[in-house]
Amino acid sequence: MKLVVVSAGLSVPSSTRLLADRLAEATRTSLGDADVPAVEVPVVDVRVVEVRELATAIANHLVTGFPSPVLSDAIDAVTEADGLIAVTPVFSASYSGLFKSFFDLIDNTALAGKPVLIAATGGTARHSLVLEHAMRPLFAYLRALVVPTAVYAASEDWGSEGDSRTDDLPRRIERAGAELAELMESRARTRRPTEEAVVPFAEQLAALRVG
């Protein structure tokens, strides 16, 4: 099972990447739930796409119409994933321009029905509505299946227990990861091919002799 994480953090180290990694780990843990028999636990292949490393390639693709091999590989990884985690820093009360430019290059039908977890980071909790007024509409337009719990992490969330009145960051990460894992497993089950009926060879020969 393929889980792709798109992180649009611009600095190193990045709180956006930190949040992306924690969401990926929560999803992977939920996919390998201890209550599931070991033989049924899926192998989870996690890949992280750092958009900052593709900035020049994205700009070139926007003006030339041709993706570089590295950018093409990243786009293929996103479109072929079984589940997607998309995390952006907040700039001017919205997602970053680089984050939006990357998804502008993806065919607007390629994410249809794909389970997506959205998340964002910012300096203050006052920007948390960016998840609902910017990111969720973006992925709704792309017809992705966005999980109910979106995760926003402000500076004060790191290294603290969070706000007990609105739940804390670790609990939100765990809940969002579990929701994404459930949607990925559900989608995998519906795609699983049904077993073909095996017709004994003697019956096949007998059928050929009829008539």
Image (cartoon, rainbow, N blue to C red):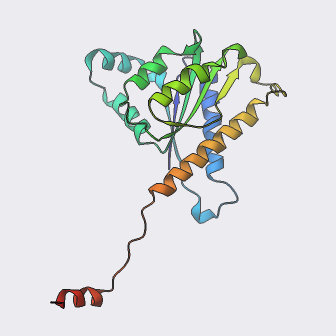
Residue at 55% x, 52% y: name it.
Answer: 186
Image quadrant of residue 130? top right
Residue 183: percent from left, percent from top: 57, 46
Q: Which residue lies furthest to the front in this view?
A: 211
Image quadrant of residue 23? top right
Q: Is residue 52 above or below residue 145?
A: above
Observer able to see residue 13: no
Q: Residue furthest right?
A: 164
Q: Is residue 79 left or right of residue 18?
A: left
Q: In this view, does 204 lie to the left or right of 173?
A: left
Residue at 59% x, 58% y: name it.
Answer: 41
Front-most of 58 and 178? 178
Residue 28: percent from left, percent from top: 61, 46
Q: In this view, does 97 lie to the left or right of 170?
A: left
Residue at 31% x, 26% y: name it.
Answer: 68
Q: Residue furthest top?
A: 92
Residue at 52% x, 25% y: name it.
Answer: 137
Residue 86: percent from left, percent from top: 54, 30
